[in-house]
Image (cartoon, grey):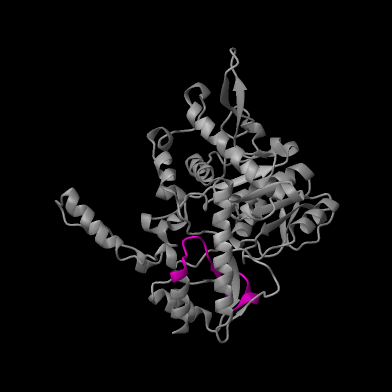
């Protein structure tokens, strides 16, 4: 296999991992008992730097949230945890119903007509939505308006390259534009004029794709309310831990007339001869199905276990609980923003713009600040200049319900020292 793909050894597959971080092996002595082995492996794991949830102030698309115990209690059940694709509806009613409930919750959250059975993550959700617009309009250009997550844009470009779709930045669509993609709040945490961007897209005959934050939808207008055609986003905050970058769950919802262009699978309801309701796979135009020549996507799976976690989280929290969580993050972020802006040399990067629970601050010696906070056990702001040169010296800070008042005090005191 190595010869076929053109490499000499397994090590050649690991070139993206710095040599200093690699181990030749776990370097365990022979003949250890299970108890001794676990102790040795734990000692290796303890060499990692782990930040307490309450002292994590970095977001940028992945967030620390409190996860109710009910989420793990349901997702760890073997009938869910080990389940495969529910091809046989008569043997998969529990899995199918769980996915159906997830779809219903996402549709309600976004105020859209239809949601599918989940995608890999927010990035692939954005790219799949752009493919939907390309097929629907027959146009080969998509616009990325404002500060959309740069990694989402990278995945979008990768998807578009194979289909000849041009991706450019801007908010002025024309006759070549298939869709205008915007993020609410954007990558810097700033609110955008979503209704105006939606109108601009529609005036040019293009679709409006809103990339939204599921928690903040509890206090912000949902995409369906301002007329967006497709709503997408990252569902990691809905009951999933960051876990070194995954697995995550992407959501996508749309208007009813676009349903046949949705990627992946859709679970619907049906009734048997005696009128009893059941759950079935519907409109599953996936590449490994019998309708594979009409597949809307080459992604052959969904993250149904992660989607189940999201469904349990949303059900457990309810509308009021979700609104409370969003409100707490809003208040703490604004409190922190005021305190940071009062520090000598610090200022809000966009003082005239509104934000929810993530904000951008212009900081003197930003890289030094982040390193010094790390030494104090605090995961500080995200340096966004690596993606946007015009934002040199700008860090974004995030607050969620896990960043309590004492954690905010600890951060400010560390910065002051």
Quadrant position of the C terminus in the picture:
bottom left
Q: Residue at x 67, y 55 (%)?
A: 220
- The range drawn in magenta is 387-406
Number of marks in picture? 0
Looking at the image, residue 263 lies above or below residue 168: above
Looking at the image, residue 199 lies above or below residue 56: above
Q: Where is residue 5 in the image (x, y as percent from the top left)?
A: 46, 50
Looking at the image, residue 343 lies above or below residue 145: below
Q: Position of residue 303 (x, y in %)?
A: 51, 42
Q: Position of residue 16 (x, y in %)?
A: 45, 62
Q: Which residue is drawn at 55% across and 78% down?
A: 340
Q: Can residue 377 be seen from the camera position used here?
A: yes
Q: Residue 404 colored magenta?
A: yes
Occupied quadrant, residue 243: bottom left
Quick one: 139 or 284, which is closer to the camera?
284
Q: In this view, does 303 lie to the left or right of 25?
A: right
Occupied quadrant, residue 40: bottom left
Q: Which residue is drawn at 41% across and 59% down?
A: 14
Q: Residue 280 colored magenta?
A: no
Occupied quadrant, residue 292: top right
Quick one: 252 or 317, which is closer to the camera?
317
Q: Position of residue 91 (x, y in %)?
A: 47, 23
Q: Residue furthest bottom?
A: 344
């Amino acid at each position: 296999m190595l010869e076929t793909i053109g490499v000499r050894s397994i090590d050649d597959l690991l070139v993206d991992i710095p040599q200093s971080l690699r181990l030749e092996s776990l370097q365990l002595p022979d003949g250890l008992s299970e108890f001794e082995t676990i102790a040795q492996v734990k000692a290796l794991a303890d060499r990692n730097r782990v930040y307490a949830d309450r002292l994590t102030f970095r977001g940028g698309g992945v967030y620390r949230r409190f996860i109710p115990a009910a989420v793990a209690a349901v997702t760890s059940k073997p009938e869910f945890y080990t389940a495969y694709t529910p091809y046989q509806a008569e043997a998969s009613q529990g899995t199918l119903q769980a996915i159906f409930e997830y779809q219903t919750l996402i549709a309600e959250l976004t105020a859209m007509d239809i949601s599918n059975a989940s995608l890999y993550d927010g990035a692939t959700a954005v790219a799949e939505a752009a493919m939907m617009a390309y097929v629907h309009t027959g146009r080969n250009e998509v616009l990325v308006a404002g500060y959309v997550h740069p990694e989402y844009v990278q995945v979008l470009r990768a998807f578009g390259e194979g289909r000849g779709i041009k991706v450019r930045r801007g908010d002025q669509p024309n006759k070549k534009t298939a869709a205008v993609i915007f993020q609410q709040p954007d990558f810097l945490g700033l609110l955008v004029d979503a209704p105006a961007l939606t109108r601009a897209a529609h005036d040019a005959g293009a679709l409006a794709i809103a990339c939204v934050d599921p928690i903040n939808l509890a206090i912000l207008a949902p995409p369906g309310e301002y007329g967006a055609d497709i709503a997408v986003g990252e569902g990691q905050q809905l009951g999933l831990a960051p876990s070194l970058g995954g697995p995550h769950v992407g959501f996508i919802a749309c208007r009813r007339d676009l349903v046949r262009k949705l990627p992946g699978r859709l679970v619907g309801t049906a009734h048997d001869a005696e009128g009893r309701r059941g759950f079935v796979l519907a409109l599953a135009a996936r590449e490994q199905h019998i309708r594979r020549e009409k597949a809307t996507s080459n992604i052959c799976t969904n993250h149904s276990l992660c989607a189940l976690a999201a469904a349990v989280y949303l059900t457990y929290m309810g509308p009021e609980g979700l609104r409370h969580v969003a409100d707490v993050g809003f208040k703490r972020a604004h409190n922190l923003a005021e305190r940071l802006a009062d520090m000598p040399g610090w200022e809000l990067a966009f003082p005239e713009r509104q934000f929810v629970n993530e904000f951008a601050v212009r900081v003197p010696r930003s890289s030094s600040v982040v390193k010094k906070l790390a030494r104090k056990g605090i995961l500080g702001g995200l340096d966004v200049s690596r993606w946007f040169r015009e934002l040199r010296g700008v860090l974004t800070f995030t607050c969620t319900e896990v960043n309590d008042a004492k954690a905010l005090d600890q951060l400010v005191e560390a910065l002051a020292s």
